[in-house]
Amino acid sequence: MTEITGRSLSVGISDSPRLVSAAFDWLARAQQEPRQARREWAERGIALLPLGTRFNVVRLPARLVHTAVGTDDLEIVTTTLAQLLDGPVIHNRPQDTYHALVEPCPVARWACPDDAPMLGTGQFLSVPASDPTGPTGL
């Protein structure tokens, strides 16, 4: 299961459809044509969003995150990441990784390319639709 967490989305996400809609509208704008992302979510349940213009991501292996937080309890990890990172994080359960969305910058300047690589221009992030209920759902 993939989840998005962050300061504004970590509390009451299921109780706030407008907040989720606003977050996905923002994500969709990563594509030159935001309607394309919405179409991909509707037709395939997942959208490939280009990195490097609206945001980059830092790929964090779950073992690294769980060690840093001191637990693998998803609620505690979600709350802690929201407090520490002050921004959205996508948790990809099947791949056991977290993707922290960060401001776009040259990837070459990133200080931790081996343990937590930054992905940027020329790369894509797969983001599931906000409403699937299966194992790849949000």
Image (tube, rainbow, N blue to C red):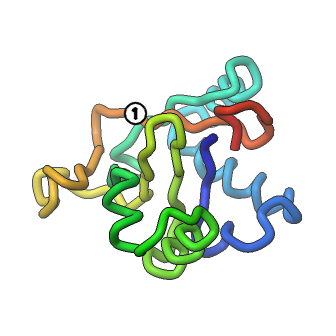
**Image quadrant of residue 129?**
top right
**Image quadrant of residue 128?**
top right
Q: Could you tell me which secondary element the residue under label 1 belongs to?
A: strand
Q: Which quadrant of the rendered structure holds the C terminus?
A: top right
- Residue at the image position 80 percent from the left and 70 percent from the top: 12
- Figure check: 44 above or below 87: above
Residue 95 in the image: state x and y as whole percent: 44, 36
Residue 25 in the image: state x and y as whole percent: 69, 49
Q: Report the number of discs.
A: 1
- Figure check: 96 above or below 55: above
Q: Amino acid at mark 1?
A: Phe
Q: Is residue 37 left or right of residue 100?
A: right
Q: Residue furthest bottom?
A: 83
From the image, tell me which residue sits under label 1: 124
Q: Residue furthest top?
A: 43
- Residue at the image position 28 percent from the left and 32 percent from the top: 122
Q: Which quadrant of the rendered structure holds the N terminus?
A: top right
- Figure check: 99 above or below 103: above
Question: Foreground: 60 or 110?
Answer: 60
Residue 59 in the image: state x and y as whole percent: 34, 50
- Residue at the image position 51 percent from the left and 77 percent from the top: 80
